[in-house]
Each structure stands twice: as C-alpha cells, then as structure tokens.
Amino acid sequence: MKPLSVIYWTRACLGIVAAVLCVVIGLYIEMFNNILNGISLALLVYIITNYILRQLFIAKVEKASKVFTTGIGAYFLVWIVTWILLYSLTHPTG
C-alpha cells in the first residue's frame, strides 16, 4: 500500500479508538459525557497520533502537511458515528 493510504486507514481506525476512549472515560468521569469534552479528547488523540505518524512517514511523503491532512475527515466522521452509537448503547433512556 502507498504511505498515504496507510495513513488514511490508520486515522479511520484511530477514530474508533478515540470514540471508545471517550465513552469509557465518560462512564467513569461524568464530566466527559458532553460533546465539547468529547471533541477535546478526540482532538488530543488526533494531535498526539499526528506526531507519531509524522515521525514514521515523513521520509515517504512529499510534504509534511500531507501527513496532517490525510484522513482528517475520515477520522472525525468515524469518531462521531462510533461515539454516538456507543454512547447510545451505554446510556439508554427510559
């Protein structure tokens, strides 16, 4: 696979990991059961993993900015969908 494809699919999988992390932390710390804290945690995971991916793929892509922008949409879309589904399962109403 091409390096940008690997980065893209890694980010999509990290979106799932970030959503699971948001739900698990929200179960134990009530403060994390709102969207703003969830977004903050998702951004933190994205920024931390960006530095890791940049170190791994900097020599294999033409620009360093490509590492940052590749998969950003997939990451947040997968994160929000997974977070909503898991949150709905762990916090049923009624």
Image (cartoon, rainbow, N blue to C red):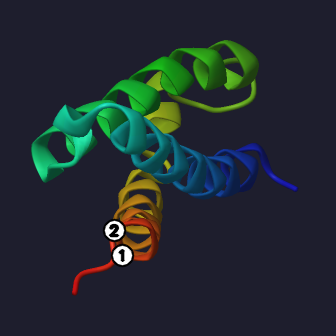
Q: CA distance from mark 2 to mark 1?
A: 5 Å
Q: Position of residue 20 (x, y in %)?
A: 53, 50
Above or below for 88 versus 83:
below
**Which of 81/75 is in front?**
81
Residue at 65% over, 54% down: 13
Q: Quadrant of residue 29?
A: top left
Q: Which mark is residue 91?
A: 2
Above or below for 83 versus 61:
below
- The amino acid at mark 1 is Ser
Q: Tell me the residue that label 1 is attached to.
A: 88
Left or right position of 6 against 36: right
Looking at the rendered image, the disc whose residue lies closer to the viewer, 2 or 1, is 2
Q: Position of residue 83 (x, y in %)?
A: 40, 62
How many marks do you count on the picture? 2
Q: Position of residue 64 (x, y in %)?
A: 49, 23
Residue at 58% over, 58% down: 12
Left or right position of 30 against 16: left
**Which of 90/13 is in front?**
90
Above or below for 82 versus 70:
below
Q: Residue furthest front?
A: 94
Q: Position of residue 30 (x, y in %)?
A: 23, 38
Query: Is disc 2 placed on a helix, strand or loop?
Result: loop
